[in-house]
Image: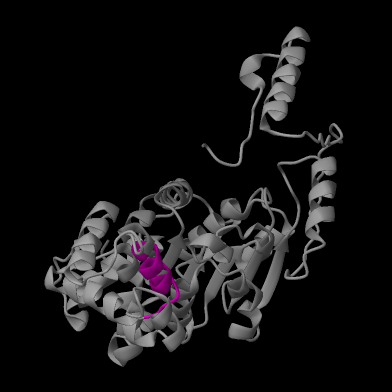
Amino acid sequence: MSQSTVPAPAAPREALIAGLNEPQREAVLTTEGPVLMLAGAGTGKTAALTARLAWLIHNRLAWPSEILCVTFTNKAAREMRERVGNLIGDAVEGMPWLGTFHSIGARMLRRHAELVGLQSNYTIIDTDDQLRLLKQLIAANDLDEKRWPARQLAGLIDRWKNRGLNPADLDAAENEMYANGRGQQFYQLYQDRLKALNACDFGDLLLHMLNILRRHRDVLEQYQSRFKYILVDEYQDTNQVQYLWLRLLAQQRQNICVVGDDDQSIYSWRGAEVANILKFEKDFPGSKVIRLEQNYRSTPQILAAASGLISENSQRLGKTLWTERHAGDKLRVIGVWDAPEEARRVGEDIERLEREGAPLDQVAILVRAQY
């Protein structure tokens, strides 16, 4: 979108915050300085984040191309774009920096690929290609593939990249622990091979850009100047490289708003660090913490049970969810000996509900994993 023409707003200013509760409005209207939107499940954080983004554009606080808005999934990015489009019309089409960490990292890297030894038309390899490449390196370097299978080494390299570590950054202990004491060497061989192929894996999309921002002050200042506002969804699920990348970009203007819930950090197995949200106020002195605590989804019984459990966690910033919904059924906790008994009990409950006239298409079974 040309910056010489500002699209006509699709909704009056007041409409952007209509229907929001007071903390949500505060999150939208506090446009300057670092903001932590501490939002519990079902508290309307997506509505608040969408309204904030629309407010910035509608009120000419920044051009759409001057806002970095990061989501965790492509689906979330599409939904954000659609919601903002419904509020302000075509202006949202000028938002090239609304997307996932990896899509934005890839876009940046295309512009600066030569700074890490790549060409702008580099290839992003998928998991299968990565495993094939690692198997070739394992064979060429006399590693025992049974002892060091390609999938295990791929996971190891991915974890290093999630932590923002280059081969030279590995300490002696990690180097000795992996690949027969050649962890650093093998990681470097893998990176060199990728570079020779003019390729990178998903982890490189952010690690390469982190390296560029750290080593090339002019590039860092270019993006710090460009992004007048930074918005980040699901901040509790950021890993170290994402955290470091964001912190660099936000250092100059400090107009960063992150949305997250320290009680919902469940992705530590893939590198997420709940400490990122816990130390936000330390990273950005003078931060404003806005708590979204009114829940629109659950009953008082569910909220009371959840709050009672999570209150035992000492590593949290603290909030108390509440709802205006009427009381629902009490929670039941049923203990069983094993999986077969559990399945039998669930089946019996469903049969009972069917006899009582409950439609089966309104019966849900939630499981932890599909295996």
Dividing the picture into quarters, in which one does residue 363 lie? top right
Question: Depth check: 36 or 338 in front?
Answer: 338
The question of residue 115 being in magenta is answered with no
Q: Position of residue 173 (x, y in %)?
A: 46, 84
Query: Which residue is at 34% across, 58% downward?
Result: 151
| Residue 63 seen in the figure | no
Q: Relative to 193, say whether 133 is above or below.
A: above
Q: Which residues are magenta?
A: 153-165
Question: Depth check: 288 or 307 in front?
Answer: 307
Numbered-mark total: 0
Query: Which residue is at 42% across, 88% downward?
Result: 172
Q: Position of residue 75 (x, y in %)?
A: 42, 47
Q: Relative to 112, say whether 22 is above or below.
A: above
The secondary structure that most of the magenta stretch takes on is: helix
Q: Relative to 271, say whether 177 is above or below.
A: below
| Residue 139 seen in the figure | yes
Dividing the picture into quarters, in which one does residue 209 lie? bottom left
Question: Depth check: 215 or 285 in front?
Answer: 215
Query: Which residue is at 27% across, 61% downward?
Result: 1
The question of residue 160 being in magenta is answered with yes
Question: Depth check: 51 or 272 in front?
Answer: 272
Query: Which residue is at 26% across, 79% downward?
Result: 188
